[in-house]
Amino acid sequence: MSFAPDITERLARARADLRMGVPVVVTTKGESGSLLVMAAETLDNRRLADLRLLGGTPVIAVTGRRAETLKARAYDADIARVVLPVDAGLAWVQAIADPADDLIAPMKGPLSTLRDGPADAHRAAITLTKAARLLPAAVCLDVAAGFAGDHDLTAVPAHAIMDTSLSPLAPLIAARLPMEASEAGRLHIFRPEDGAEEHYAIEVGKPDRSLPVLARLHSACFTGDVLGSLKCDCGPQLRGALAAMGTEGQGVLLYLNQEGRGIGLANKMRAYSLQDQGFDTVEANHRLGFEDDERDFRIGAEILKRMGFSAVRLLTNNPAKIAKMEDAGVKVTERVPLKVGENSHNVAYLATKAAKSGHLL
Ligand SMILES: Nc1nc2c(ncn2[C@@H]2O[C@H](COP(=O)(O)OP(=O)(O)OP(=O)(O)O)[C@@H](O)[C@H]2O)c(=O)[nH]1
Ligand SMILES: [Zn+2]
């Protein structure tokens, strides 16, 4: 009998802790052992002062993307460990993590980055901040084994954070949902076992499981789907896909809670703020320290398979989605273009997606 949380549950706790500003400890088997980790975004003055009392050399781990903008040398390939100067305060930490003021205060340096020593735990710390939908930057300090226990902190092994296997998704409940596009709608809720966000599937009609189904993998876009934002084409694509399924009398639309191409709504708004400064959608993601697209489309493939679908006619303009479906074992027998909702505000955004992300015009 055990009531203690397992590794997956402790990972969920660690994400929640970081969002609240509570430190966590990342452990490795190597020489350093335990790394105290705080998300740069949620660090406060009290914990920064406490960190200083511990001595040692605190660093901020940032992604290679962010390091490039900061002109910091990334000795660890895809990440950099920026040394926290002795006199650096909270504003300095936040300016390293957050590109909001990069243009008005461009000189943060010269920044010194660590070259020696293991960086696996630091890399895991950044991955954890991303999973918590925070800015990908972590304030880190080597601590003695036992630190987590002494301070009642959640400890997680780096290898568990870096484990990329997909968490099982269980179908939770489904119910009839008549919609404008089709009265024969049914909404299914899927809940992942790792405590991450739920995802939804809207089934239209009763599609024959032995035939390729008309399908759409829609990523959540609060601004486009709900507010009718003109900055993207998501709202018209969502309604267009449902309308096509209504006309055909069958189909399946997955509503994946991967807002902002997987960076979360707060970070997407940071990206929008950078776009107001003149950066395009891809550059904005990079300046924040993210890749262009942080979504995991295996989730969509898994839900389709759980629902009994093995082949789809996919409504998309994004060839990467097709490749990722095929990789995950869902056959794409046809690409059905979905070109709706172009306007004067999003024409540059759509052109950037075509030029940089391979979208078909
Ligand atoms: N980070 C970021 N995300 C954005 C931006 N504009 C829209 N999004 C998000 O991008 C996602 C929309 O992508 P989709 O329409 O599903 O897919 P796609 O990759 O464009 O491919 P299609 O199937 O052709 O539509 C949603 O999660 C939006 O919230 C932006 O400027 N920055
Ligand atoms: Zn959108």
Image (tube, grey):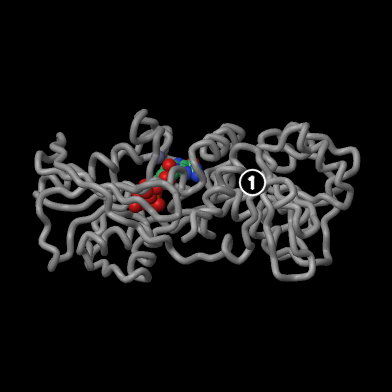
- Residue 206's quadrant in the figure? bottom left
In this view, the residue in front, 192 or 249, is: 192
Question: Is residue 356 in view?
Answer: no
In the drawing, does residue 105 fall left or right of residue 100? right
Front residue (pair 58, 73): 58
> Which residue is identified by label 1?
287
Count residues near mark 1 (Cα–Cα under 10 Å), then give few for <14, some for 14-19, many for 20+: many
Q: Which residue lies furthest to the top in this view?
A: 227
Q: Residue furthest front?
A: 1
Residue sitting at x 20%, y 46%: 174
- The local secondary structure at tag 1 comes to helix
Q: Is residue 203 shown left or right of residue 107?
A: left
Q: In which quarter of the image is residue 231?
A: top left
- In this view of the protein, which residue sits in the foreground, 181 or 85? 85
Amino acid type at circle 1 is Arg
- Residue at horizontal 53%, vertical 34%? 269
Q: Quadrant of residue 96?
A: top right
The image position of residue 67, as x and y in percent, is 72, 52
Residue drawn at (60%, 52%) of the image: 128
Residue 29: percent from the left, percent from the top? Answer: 70, 70
Above or below 88: residue 75 = below
Q: Which of 346 and 297 is in front in this view?
A: 297
| Ligand 1 closer than 8 Å to label 1 CB | no
Task: Please report the residue visible at 30 percent of the width from the left and 47 percent of the height from the top.
Answer: 200
- Left or right, 210 with respect to 234, comes to left
Res 174 seen here: yes
Number of marks in the image? Answer: 1
